Amino acid sequence: MVVVGLDYGHAGQMTIDEITGGSPYGASTIAGGTGQRQPSENDLAGARYQGRRVAETAKKLTA
């Protein structure tokens, strides 16, 4: 099994301007106790970044 996390190439996980999810283990969002918070654009950008990395890694592994 290969784990493809959200690496430090995605600078959005290091912002202090807003509450943001994401860690080296993967994209995430902080939804609050009742789920009232939706993913921010920064959270979604992290998910897209990780998705590209997963696809690139899978392509290399199947080559």
Image (cartoon, rainbow, N blue to C red):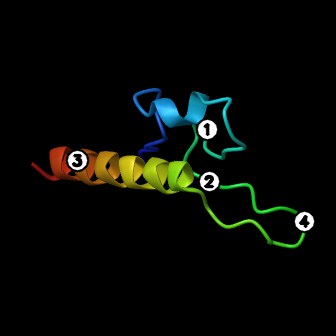
Give how far apart the Cα atoms at labels 3 and 2 are: 20 Å
Front position in the image: 52 or 63:
52
Check the image and name the residue furthest to the front: 17
Number of on-image labels:
4
Check the image and name the residue furthest to the right: 33
Q: Residues within 10 Å of mark 2 (few under 14, many from 20)?
A: some
Q: Mark 3 or mark 4: name the one nearer the start of the chain.
A: 4
* Location of mark 4 (residue): 33
Amino acid tagged 1: Ser
* Location of mark 3 (residue): 56
Give how far apart the Cα atoms at labels 4 and 2 are: 15 Å
Residue visible at 66% across and 47% down? 21
Amino acid tagged 3: Glu
Instruction: Give how far across and how far down residue 27 sits, in percent.
Output: 55, 50
Front position in the image: 40 or 21:
40
* Labelled pair 1, 2 in contact (Cβ < 8 Å): yes
Residue visible at 30% across and 51% down? 52
Instruction: Give how far across and how far down residue 1 sits, in percent.
Output: 43, 49
Amino acid tagged 4: Gly
* Location of mark 1 (residue): 23
Residue visible at 39% across and 54% down? 48
Q: Quadrant of residue 20?
A: top right
Instruction: Give how far across and how far down residue 37 sits, in percent.
Output: 75, 65
Front position in the image: 52 or 62:
52
Q: Up-down: is 48 above or below 35?
A: above
Give how far apart the Cα atoms at labels 3 and 4 are: 35 Å
* Labelled pair 4, 1 in contact (Cβ < 8 Å): no
* Location of mark 2 (residue): 28
